């Protein structure tokens, strides 16, 4: 039985990944601070769903000095998936210090623990926001990504560079995965699908930024998790002669690689909203807004490297994924669609 440390285990992606790993027979150590960035009760409910004799929850901040070192020493993980982070582009404009502490200091603590107790493979979450001002799409892992548009994106790109240095210096096999706009059941309340669904069911208007002229590579959460699960076995190796195959983001000097996990399809924001309307059976009232600072008009993944490494391509359509989210939302929150939303008690 292999042991995996998953940070951010009560988060949206972390919850789904832990559930998948438990189903696959892993011993899972789940670390989460249960921060109040959004509804803590939702995070607690996710952890409750993970109760299992092979799941060990640890409540604490990854940036806390010594916590990760202690956990690595105690559990000697075979694998590590680092998902814990302060998320959100817009929040980083007003609260940048929380990104410095959680994303950069937290990743440093993970890397130091891995240096002392090396796992077979580490996967660290990055983001499509790392591509920043790049306009050539679809985004490929081999293009330069030097002009991040938000402090959130800057901290995530910094963690990529930090992880590469540790991979090079200490031979730590590391995969950074850049995920795109992830959505699905148990999603975050600060993300568009959750906010739009809640507002539509309550008869409230929705804020549509850049007047709806935005495109996103919406990636269903279970597709993302499948990609992560398969990448666990795709351990990068430093090229003996420094030669990297064409199209591969493998470092010539380290067992390190960057991989996109996206749906490989850019969807217009207005089409995404239309899918929510069909799933809810209600029409949205749109409040057209200008582009927000730090945001980008489009994201679109080239996921060929993921397919080459694992044979997998995400397969859930936006229509299917949105319908599953709305079904979950109605079951969990039991909304009174003429007014207020009551949180589920079960």
Image: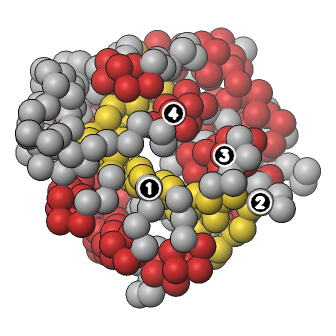
Picture quadrant of residue 147: top left
Q: Is residue 128 left or right of residue 61?
A: left
Disc 3: which residue: 21
Residue at 44% from the left image edge and 62% from the top image edge: 119
Placement of 42 over or under 274, stated as above or below: below
Q: Tag 4: Cα neighbours inside 10 Å, few (<14), some, or many (≥20)?
A: some
Whole-Å distance between the Cαs marked 1 and 2? 20 Å
Q: Tag 1: Cα neighbours inside 10 Å, few (<14), some, or many (≥20)?
A: some
Whole-Å distance between the Cαs marked 1 and 4? 15 Å
Placement of 273 over or under 23, stated as above or below: above
N-terminal of the two: label 1 or label 4? Answer: 1
- Position in image of residue 96 (x %, y %): 28, 68
Question: Do callouts 2 and 4 mark residues in contact (Cβ within 8 Å)?
Answer: no
Disc 1: which residue: 120
N-terminal of the two: label 3 or label 2? Answer: 3
Whole-Å distance between the Cαs marked 3 and 2? 10 Å
Question: Do callouts 3 and 2 mark residues in contact (Cβ within 8 Å)?
Answer: no
Whole-Å distance between the Cαs marked 1 and 3? 16 Å
- Position in image of residue 121 (x %, y %): 42, 52
Residue at 64% from the left image edge and 15% from the top image edge: 320
Disc 4: which residue: 230
Q: Tag 2: Cα neighbours inside 10 Å, few (<14), some, or many (≥20)?
A: some
Regarding residue 306, the answer to whether it shows in the image is: no
Placement of 341 over or under 304, stated as above or below: below
Image quarter in which the N terminus is found: bottom right
N-terminal of the two: label 2 or label 4? Answer: 2
Regarding residue 226, the answer to whether it shows in the image is: yes
Disc 2: which residue: 54
Single out the residue that lies furthest toward the right.
346
> Of residues 310 and 30, which is closer to you in this image?
310
Whole-Å distance between the Cαs marked 2 and 4? 20 Å
């Amino acid at each position: 039985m292999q042991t995996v440390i998953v940070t951010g285990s009560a988060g949206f992606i972390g919850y789904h990944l832990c559930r998948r790993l438990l189903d696959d027979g892993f011993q899972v150590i789940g670390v989460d601070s249960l921060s109040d960035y959004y509804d803590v009760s939702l995070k607690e409910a996710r952890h409750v769903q993970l109760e299992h004799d092979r799941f060990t929850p640890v409540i604490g901040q990854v940036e806390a000095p010594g916590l990760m070192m202690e956990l690595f020493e105690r559990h000697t993980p075979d694998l590590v998936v680092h998902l814990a982070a302060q998320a959100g582009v817009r929040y980083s404009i007003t609260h940048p210090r929380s990104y410095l502490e959680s994303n950069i200091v937290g990743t440093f603590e993970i890397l130091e623990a891995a240096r002392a107790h090396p796992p077979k493979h580490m996967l660290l979450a990055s983001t499509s926001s790392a591509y920043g001002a790049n306009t050539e799409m679809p985004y490929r892992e081999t293009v330069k990504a030097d002009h991040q548009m938000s402090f959130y994106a800057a901290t995530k790109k910094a963690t990529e560079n930090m992880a590469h240095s540790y991979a090079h210096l200490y031979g730590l096999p590391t995969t950074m995965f850049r995920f795109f706009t992830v959505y699905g059941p148990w999603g975050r309340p600060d993300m568009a699908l959750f906010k739009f669904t809640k507002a539509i069911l309550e008869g409230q208007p929705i804020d549509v930024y850049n007047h709806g002229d935005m495109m996103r590579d919406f990636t269903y959460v279970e597709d993302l998790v499948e990609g992560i699960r398969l990448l666990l076995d795709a351990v990068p190796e430093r090229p003996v002669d420094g030669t990297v195959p064409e199209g591969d983001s493998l470092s010539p000097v380290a067992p390190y690689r960057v991989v996109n996990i996206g749906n490989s399809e850019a969807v217009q924001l207005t089409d995404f909203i239309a899918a929510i309307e069909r799933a809810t059976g209600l029409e949205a009232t749109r409040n057209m807004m200008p582009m927000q600072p730090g945001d980008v008009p489009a994201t679109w993944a080239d996921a060929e490297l993921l397919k080459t490494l694992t044979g997998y391509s995400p397969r859930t359509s936006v229509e299917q994924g949105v319908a599953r989210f709305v079904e979950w939302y109605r079951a969990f929150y039991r909304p009174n669609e003429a007014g207020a939303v009551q949180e589920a008690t079960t």
